[in-house]
Image (cartoon, helix red, strand yellow):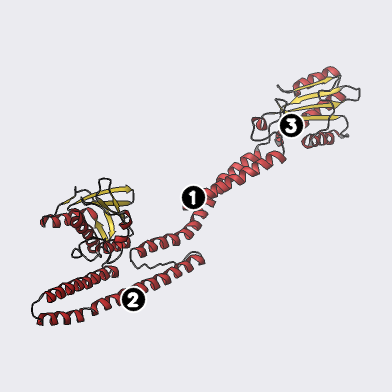
Amino acid sequence: MTPRLCLLFCATLLLAHAAAALVLHQTGSLVHPLSYGQALERLAVARTAVDRLPAAQADALLRVLAEPPARLWVAATPEVAPFPMLTEERRLARDLARRLGQLEDGLVMQLESTAGEAARASPLTAAGWAPLQLRSSLALPDGRWLNAVQYPARSDGWLTALGWSLLLGAVPVLLLGWLLIGQLVRPLRQLTRAAEGLSRGERSRLDVRRGPREARELAAAFELMQERLLRHLDDRVRMLAAISHDFNTPLAALRVQLALLEPSAERDDMEESLGELDAMVQETLDFIRGERQTEVHQDIDLSALLQDLRERYQALDQPVTWPEDGPFPLRGRPLALKRALGNLLDNALQHGGSATLELSRPAPQLLRLDILDDGPGLPEDQLERVFEPFYRPPGQDSTRGLGLGLAIARACILAHGGELQLHNRPEGSLCARVILPLAI
């Protein structure tokens, strides 16, 4: 953001100076001050010489005054016929008449480009910067005309001044802009990092003591929102944990009463139902423990974590395949992440018979882990519903889990700032795709 704003400042300065150059080109003096005075002085000396010297001496002096390619001569006809002169030309005639001590009558001056085009052409064209020529005709008392063609230099001093102004003005403006923008952007960067941390369950402290008042107010509002949100989540988790924990007391009583009953088919059914209820309570407690996020965030090598999981499953003769690669650093809670990935592997092994891991980097700051199985896949309308707690697809064996594994896995992945999705592969099997941000 800071470089873009600095570039915007530079562009603004450049546009302002370009606009000033355009205005000065159209309204400022066309002739350089030195050339302006030299051209008028040459005409005044020539006019005086023609009036006061013999013709031969006057002609000789005119040849001396007329430095090539300029020309000075006396003729019966004017070089420039009288015409409505423009502002710059009238100013030249007025200043010349003042030098000669006469009226402007009989003074005709035309300023144009050497190509014969208007002297004040558009600065966006070559004619706007073409060399100038000044054609003059001064009426003499005997009816003849003193003609002159001179080539004064353009007045480009303002252009040089604007160039130095742009160069020297841009440096302090950029330095000051960089400091001011840094004061504005720094709190936003802190807020961005704090929001990312909050999405992973981390409590962040914003120290915004300097900067704009609005930034300090924003930081205070964020901290207040963070405290309320985390307190609400903690209260909810504690309430659910207390409810689930309280179920253990009646379950223990039921278990004792069942032990006192005589063996029978009804007792076996009751024990099976009690076992399912006990497993559901334990699964719920495990789910709540994951939600509380008591584990500290730390740097993790996902490659090493996957290697540990593969060795664990291979020790149990489970077909888990992963070509070791890495390292792939990220930041998170290693035990929670290992549990989430373990749930995904268990799901692939139970319903697909095997699990193949594929780790890649789809973007410079993202990791993608695909867990592939050899099962039949899922109907498209079930790919999202299976993430709901205690949901099991129709026809699934009730003894194979309570429907919390995927919910726990997604909750953990989302708490790490990632995503978890299921999709069917073209071959017919299922792919669990995990997207996680790399540690920066």
Q: Quadrant of residue 32?
A: top right
Q: Are marks 1 and 2 in contact (CB under 8 Å)?
A: no
Does dot 1 land on a helix, a strand or a loop?
A: helix
Q: What residue is pinned by disc 1?
A: 4
Mark 1 vs mark 2: which is more N-terminal?
1
Front label number (3 vs 2): 2
Q: Residue at x 83, y 32 (%)?
A: 84
Q: Residues within 10 Å of mark 3 (few under 14, many from 20)?
A: few
Q: Are marks 3 and 1 in contact (CB under 8 Å)?
A: no
| Residue 73 visible, this angle | yes
Q: Residue at x 26, y 59 (%)?
A: 299
Q: Amino acid at mark 2?
A: Asp
Q: Amino acid at mark 3?
A: Gln
Which residue occupies the foreground of this view, 70 or 432? 432
Farthest right residue in view: 142
Q: What residue is pinned by disc 2?
A: 235
Mark 3 vs mark 2: which is more N-terminal?
3
Give the Cα distance between marks 1 and 2.
44 Å
Does dot 2 land on a helix, a strand or a loop?
A: helix
Q: Residue at x 81, y 35 (%)?
A: 90
In the image: residue 183, left or right of residue 328:
right
Give the Cα distance between marks 3 and 2.
92 Å
Mark 3 vs mark 1: which is more N-terminal?
1
Q: Position of residue 268 (x, y in %)?
A: 12, 74
